[in-house]
Image (cartoon, rainbow, N blue to C red):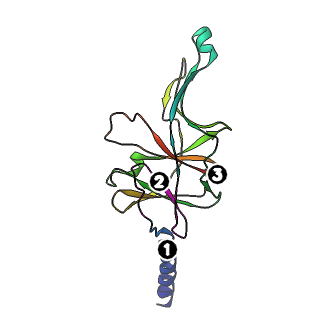
Amino acid sequence: MKKCSFLFSILCAVGMTAFGQTTVNVDEPEYIGEAVSVSAENVATPLEKQSVKIQTKAGASVYLVGIGKVKSKMVIEGGSSPVLMKAGDPLTFVVKSFDNKSDPLSIISVVKFEASKKNRKSELVSAGTFSGASTNNQNYIKYQSKKYKDSSYVLRLDPMDVGEYGIIVSNPNALANSNTIVACFSVQ
């Protein structure tokens, strides 16, 4: 009996600790697609919002001999986000969606960008003469999620490597997203 009560006490303590870490109490972001970072003290920090340009480039060999590779990339101006997160810490975000009835994995993507001094890029599509085509080539980051308030989700990410990241909310009802907005942050 003592063993059972001791085990129950440990399970309760672990459960309370885990539950305490999952409590988020901030306002939902105002607009669909916006995201805020939530600190351990429940302070919400809006993420940088950037419009995306699509850039398509072909290797020189495509022009010279008709053989080679063509790539399309999502490009964000500026080499680094001004919103900084600490490397090695788990991250929590609140992301506003159209509603929170959909599976968030189908509408919310967290991606890692290739960063340079001038911009941040993520490959969308590549096609080669002999290698065929591949889509959805972005470097996706796994997350855990829960419904939050009326139309948002809480995303929890394990500690991440240093780099540039973005959160993209897609509209499952839209036929074409003419202007993709990315909520950006930097892990340093």
Q: Secondary structure at mark 3?
A: loop
Q: Is residue 92 above or below residue 50?
A: below
Q: Secondary structure at mark 2?
A: strand
Residue under circle 1?
20
Between the C-alphas of marks 1 and 2, the distance is: 22 Å
Can residue 41 be found in the magenta stretch? yes
Residue under circle 2?
35
Report how many numbered discs are placed on residues in the image.
3
Q: Is residue 73 above or below residue 182?
A: above
x then y, percent, for residue 116: 67, 38
Between the C-alphas of marks 3 and 1, the distance is: 25 Å
Residue under circle 3?
161
The mark nearer the N terminus, 3 or 1, is 1
Q: Nearer the viewer, residue 16 or 40?
A: 40
Mark 2, other Cα within 10 Å: few <14 / some 14–19 / many ≥20? many
x then y, percent, for residue 62: 59, 14
What amino acid type is highlighted by mark number 1? Gly
The span shown in magenta is 27-46
x then y, percent, for residue 146: 41, 60
Mark 1, other Cα within 10 Å: few <14 / some 14–19 / many ≥20? few
Q: Are marks 1 and 2 in contact (CB under 8 Å)?
A: no
Can residue 52 be found in the magenta stretch? no
Residue occupying image coordinates x 45% and y 66%:
26
Q: Nearer the viewer, residue 9 or 54?
A: 54
Mark 3, other Cα within 10 Å: few <14 / some 14–19 / many ≥20? some
